[in-house]
Amino acid sequence: MALTPKVRIEDILNRVELYRPDLDENLLRHAYVFAANRHQGQVRRSGEAYFVHPLTVAWILAQMELDEVAIAAGLLHDILEDTETTEAELEAEFGSQISRLVAALTKISVYESSYTTREETDAENFRRLLLASIDDVRVILIKLADRLHNMRTLNFLRRERQVAIAQETLEIYAPISNRLGIGSIKGELEDLCFRYLHPHAAERLEHEIEERAAAAKRWFSRIQDELTELTHEHDIQGTIEGRVKHHYSVYRKLKAQGIDVSNVFDFLAFRIIVPTIADCYSTLGLIHQQWSPVPGRIKDYIAMPKPNAYQSLHTSVIGPEGHPFEIQIRTEAMHKIAEFGIAAHWSYKEGEAEVEQDSRVTWLRSLLDNSTSSSPREFLDSLKVDLYPDEVYAFTPKGDVFSFPAGAALLDFAYRIHTEVGHTCVGGRVNGRWVPLKTSLKNGDIVEISTSPQQAPHHDWLSLVGTNRARSKIRAHLKREEKVRAIEVGRKLFEREIRRRGVGLKRVLGSDEMKAALVTHGLAKDEDLFAAMGFGRLSAQTIVAQVVPDQGAETPSATHEDRWAAAPKSPKDGGGGLEVTGDPDFLVYVAQCCAPVRGEEIVGFVTRGKGVAVHARSCPNVKNLLYHPEREIPVRWSRGLDGRGGQGSQVDLDMVFREDPAMLTSISQAISAEGSGIVSCHLQTEQAEGRGSASVTVMVDDADHLRRIIDRLLSLKGMHEVERRSGRGQFSRAAASRG
Ligand code: MN
């Protein structure tokens, strides 16, 4: 691609007119004037006016034969980032298509500023991120033109900036242009990077090529004459180009072979462009008649295109004086694709529908996966498949990129960072905004996780996460937690049972009978035995009968009374005073989804390792298939020590009322008038609508008590609505532990 020192808008208009005769000249002139105005006074490091940069980018796009929308966006590409112009202003001025292109380019700059390479996979992820997050091919084409001009003018920056930018270009943008088949940009980018990353090697190579320039010239014209004669004789309209190969590719080749530049033939090559595919093959035949081909060097990329759609015939022949040299043969259309890749496809037609535009993006994305293109057939098939719709790429604030399956949540991100970060995650910031655990990740999100030592994994989390990794970590944690709890419960059951037989725990542990019991049940440790009892797999009575022979214990009725009083309370029981009908040894807890209060109709379900969950009969989870009927177990409200119902339950009430500063006082008075107290309260007013709302947690004795409290609140002047909130979900817990 020719370097043009000073581009003028007229050059661009003339160039575009060659391939788009009905071009919208006004759009380009408008963009030119607008951008020139906004960048006025800004100066590049080179000392030139800043506007030279977007103008040159537009020129490069015109050489790629893109449409005027892309070229206008090229003129405007830095305007959101570097001037006061807003996206809305841009849209009002140039329409949504152009403003979206420029906004997407600005977003890529944000990605770039957070990108730092650690490993090859980071670069690969970053490339995929860029391509997955754009929905218009022109974005990446403009980006490549932008980068190309920045690389051409890199010499004005400080040395360390040069190296950093060249490194990024070689890792990100050269591979992208290669995958997109844009040979001209790829070659130039690599050569420019080479100069900054390996200055000594680049200088030496340049020097050697220069030294051989005279010899090369002679040799070149001789071959060219012979080739011209050859094609002429056989009526093939060929154009023959001799060219110096890209320095970086010569360098790589020499380095791979461990040799120095030995002669001109290492860096010179020929290209013959002919009208038809048939001409390609006949020209190849003619060349092989003239000079002997080097075995194993003939490549037919016409029959077997490269994954990036490159097509050509390659051969190496032994030329005059026994020196081998390379020849590429292709048609004009193939040449265009070799130089401009997807840009050439893009400019084939104009004014196409959105659908076709989409299919080009699909094609582009499918190009990126080189593993799918082992045969031309598979290659063609792969063009129809979008390879990345199922993946999402998100960043840490430090710029690490992680990929996730689509639908992954913030919590998955936390688990990707570290298991412990996942376990204690309470939410986080996505692009600077607070969001809950379940928030779905989107491409390009910058995610910052917040943790709290009070947080712990919850069963609900299993349905929030989208990755197997997070799910298995949560499951493992819950299992461990369940086992700890089961051991604790089992130990209590066991202890009470042996105490009833008048024996202390110390005497039993380590005894021969205890060891025998472990062997009988195939267990290794006491803990395993307690766990089995806690999980309900073994009955405490059975084990104790084996370990301590019955010496005539208390009467069953006394035992029964004792059990009433000492019914074990689970950590989540909240003092509701619940028991499994006829079997108070069971570990019972109030289900968080409906949190039934004393007096409500309730139903119990055996859970794995957590005891019995008690739901309100009306809870939707009871009807759901979440629970199996065979796990249902009758439960009832038991008597507390005070003969009533223990210390009561917490209930959340949501209220809506007419905005009134005195409302909070009225609410708290109403609640204390019913002999209850407020545990916590959250008040919100929407002054514009003259409405207020409150979420209040109160203590209630039973369902009757709750009803009375609600009735009294409803009777307050200005109160519109009082509702008991069902479900004290994990988010409210997360919100609480955050504070
Ligand atoms: Mn730029």
Image (cartoon, helix red, strand yellow):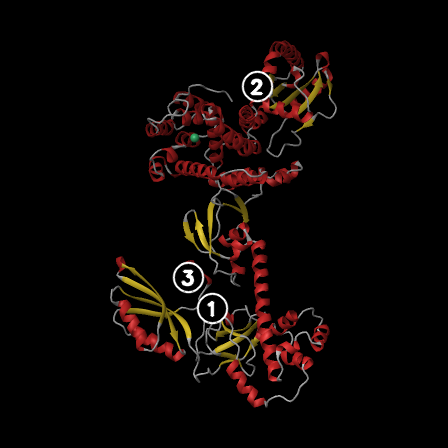
Element type at marker 2?
helix
> In this view of the protein, which residue sits in the foreground, 521 or 376?
521
Residue at mark 3 to residue at mark 1: CA–CA distance: 17 Å
> In this view of the protein, which residue sits in the foreground, 311 or 157?
157
Q: Note whether residue 503 is visible.
A: yes
The image shows residue 578, relative to residue 293, as above or below, that is below
Q: Amino acid at mark 3?
A: Ala
* Residue of label 1: 593
Q: Amino acid at mark 1?
A: Cys
* Residue of label 2: 203
Between circles 1 and 2, the one closer to the viewer is: 2
Q: Amino acid at mark 2?
A: Glu
What is the crowding at mark 1: few (fewer than 14 residues within 10 Å), some, or many (at least 20)? some
Element type at marker 3?
helix
> In this view of the protein, which residue sits in the foreground, 702 or 353?
702
Residue 319: which quarter of the image?
Answer: top right
Element type at marker 1?
loop
Image position, residue 718 (x, y; %): 26, 69
Residue 736 badge: 3
Image position, residue 490 (x, y; %): 60, 74
Q: Tell me what residue is drawn at x 50 percent, y 81 percent.
A: 636
Q: Tell me what residue is drawn at x 30 percent, y 71 percent.
A: 668
- Horizontal placement of 82 versus 203: left or right? left
Which of disc 2 and disc 1 is earlier in sequence?
2
Between circles 3 and 1, the one closer to the viewer is: 3
Residue at mark 1 to residue at mark 2: CA–CA distance: 72 Å
Which of disc 3 and disc 2 is earlier in sequence?
2
Q: Quadrant of ligand 1?
A: top left
